[in-house]
Amino acid sequence: MTKQIKISAEELSKLYEKKKLTTYQIAEKFNCCQATVWKRLKEFNINLRLAGVKRVNISEKKLKDLYLNKKFSTWKIERITQIPRGSIHRKLKEYGLKIRDRADSHIIFPRENFSGDLVEKAYLIGFRLGDLGVRKIYPNSKTICVASGSTIKEQIDLINSLFKQYGRVRSKKTRYNKINIWIALNESFDFLLTKEIPSWVEGEKKLFLSFLAGFSDAEGNIGIYNNQAVFQIGNYDKNLLLFIAKNMNNLGIVCRGPYGSNMKNYTHKEGYHYNQNYFQIRVGKKDSLLKLFGMIKPYLKHKNKIKALKKAEDNIIYRNKLKEKK
């Protein structure tokens, strides 16, 4: 028995046979599950009402709206209509409505398939490797959950813009002005589950540049230090940075690194803790920076990174003009 309840055969018979309460109503009254009530009815040899004896008054249109359109569970439909779940299931079959499996039953809000565009896919893979946690909520789930968190509003806005057309986006502000964000996607986004870079990413220049833009929007830094523009990316994954540096150099962009830093177990003054050693790659030569910025600009989506790129370009142009005057 799921839960022990104190109820006599006489009381149960009165509620079920005389007052005609449903097993759900009785279960609610005694704060137990419906299965417990069914078991007690059998134990006390109380005649069970057959689903077909009483006419089930629910139209196909209404059941379709509740079950398919609104994605209500049969439990919730029972509470709304006061029709037993067994009868709801019978009507679903009678009307030819496909009964959801466990995975489908968790899907309430509408979802759209991924567009299939390889440029967009390359960007999302790059961004995922930099800033997104991706998982299935349970092994056989049809839901792919994407999550992240940031104190930078533009970062959260970007994530929202990347996925809002595909699934439900939720966000919540936490302590220290951090915003956590979650998106529920369908299985067409299973390419985000792995952290491996597909070989096709370096098959075409535009695909690699879109991948690089995604990763840069997540992890890159475009800044001016000591009056010199710099592009750099930091990450724990040295092999990932080697892959990026190799492909940038193949495009004629001089990229140095990865440079390692012994940051394991170090806690930054702002409270960020490094679990592993950290690596960086860097582009500092003016001609390489201008070439990189020209190539990557069409693919960047982060507002702050786009603004930083423009300032870095202006810095290089200004320095070149000063050099020409000398």
Image (cartoon, helix red, strand yellow):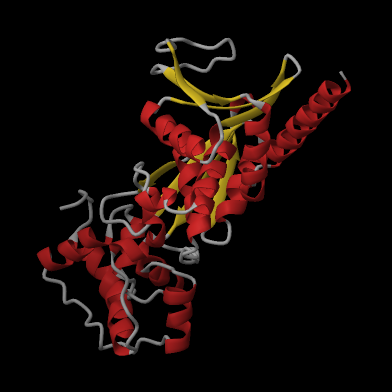
Q: In the rendered view of the protein, which quadrant contains the C terminus?
A: top right
Across and down, in percent, residue 90 comes to 27, 82
In the image: residue 312, left or right of residue 88: right
Depth check: 44 or 24 in front? 24
Against 115, is 235 above or below?
above
Depth check: 97 or 180 in front? 180
In the image: residue 168, left or right of residue 258: right
Determine the residue positioned at 60% across, 26% down.
175
Against 323, is 149 above or below?
below
In the image: residue 171, left or right of residue 243: right
Depth check: 162 or 125 in front? 125
Depth check: 126 or 3 in front? 126
Determine the residue positioned at 78% across, 27% down.
315
Whether residue 131 is visible, yes or no, is no
Across and down, in percent, residue 75 comes to 36, 66
Q: How many numbered callouts?
A: 0
Across and down, in percent, residue 30 comes to 32, 54
Against 9, is 155 above or below?
above
Across and down, in percent, residue 174 comes to 59, 31
Q: Quadrant of residue 228?
A: top right
Determine the residue positioned at 66% across, 50% down.
298
Check the image and name the residue furthest to the right: 325
Whether residue 203 is visible, yes or no, is yes
Against 30, is 279 above or below?
above
Determine the residue positioned at 30% across, 89% down.
94
Q: Quadrant of residue 92?
A: bottom left
